[in-house]
Image: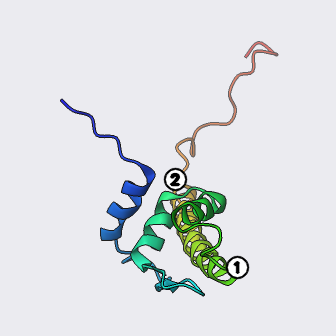
């Protein structure tokens, strides 16, 4: 059985097929100022999903397109997409955790109705 190992770039481009169907964040293509380079929205979304930190996200684009191709405005736009998407993702995660807490707090107490006058052993009872 062969084991397939993917590079970060392969993972990014495979993520192009992933649509953010459940997201309200709209990601548009970014055209790098001063060049004919266009970064497709699907590549941006793939990089967002594959990056754990903003630094990792930025590093990917600097490696792919170079330090001089991306102007500060372009990187700011990419980071805006990253932060909006991750903020929405974190909010959904917090909401689902809160729902889980609400469910456990409404459960009945399994010890309710038991006598509280249990022997302590101090006075021989």
Q: Alpha-carbon distance for marks 1 and 2?
A: 56 Å
Say how the picture is coloured: rainbow
Is 45 placed left or right of 15 in the picture?
right
* Percent of width and height locating residue 63: 56, 60
Identify which residue is drawn at 62% across, 58% down: 53
Q: Measured from the top left, where is residue 25 in percent x and y?
A: 50, 82
What residue lies at 47% left-to-right and 86% top-to-bottom? 28
Label 1 SS:
helix
- Which label is found at residue 72? 1
The correct choice, above or below, for 49 with respect to 125 in the image is below
Is label 1 or label 2 in front? 1
Q: Do the residues bearing badges 1 and 2 touch, measured as CB atoms within 8 Å?
A: no
From the viewer's perspective, is 86 left or right of 116? left
Per the image, the residue denoted by label 2 is 108
Assess disc 2: are there few (<14), some (14-19) or many (≥20) residues with their C-alpha within 10 Å of its C-alpha: few
Residue placed at 59% from the left, 77% from the top? 78
The structure residue drawn at horizontal position 70% and vertical position 32%, both measured from the top left corner, is 117
Foreground: 124 or 59? 59
**Percent x, y of residue 54:** 64, 63
Report x, y in % for residue 77.
Answer: 62, 82
Relative to the observer, which residue lies in front, 1 or 116?
Answer: 1
Classify the position of the C terminus by image quarter. Answer: top right
Q: Residue furthest top?
A: 124
- Horizontal side of 34 relative to 16 (left or right) equals right
């Amino acid at each position: 059985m062969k084991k397939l190992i993917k590079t970060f770039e392969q993972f990014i481009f495979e993520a192009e097929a992933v649509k953010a169907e459940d997201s309200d964040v709209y990601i548009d293509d970014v055209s790098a100022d001063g060049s004919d380079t266009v970064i497709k929205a699907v590549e941006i979304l793939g990089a967002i999903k594959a990056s754990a930190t903003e630094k990792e996200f930025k590093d990917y684009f600097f490696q792919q397109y170079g330090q001089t191709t991306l102007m500060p405005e372009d990187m700011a736009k990419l980071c805006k997409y990253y932060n909006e998407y991750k903020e929405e993702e974190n909010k959904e995660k917090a909401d689902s955790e809160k729902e889980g807490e609400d469910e456990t707090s409404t459960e009945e107490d399994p010890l309710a109705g038991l006598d509280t006058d249990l022997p302590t052993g101090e006075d021989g009872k």
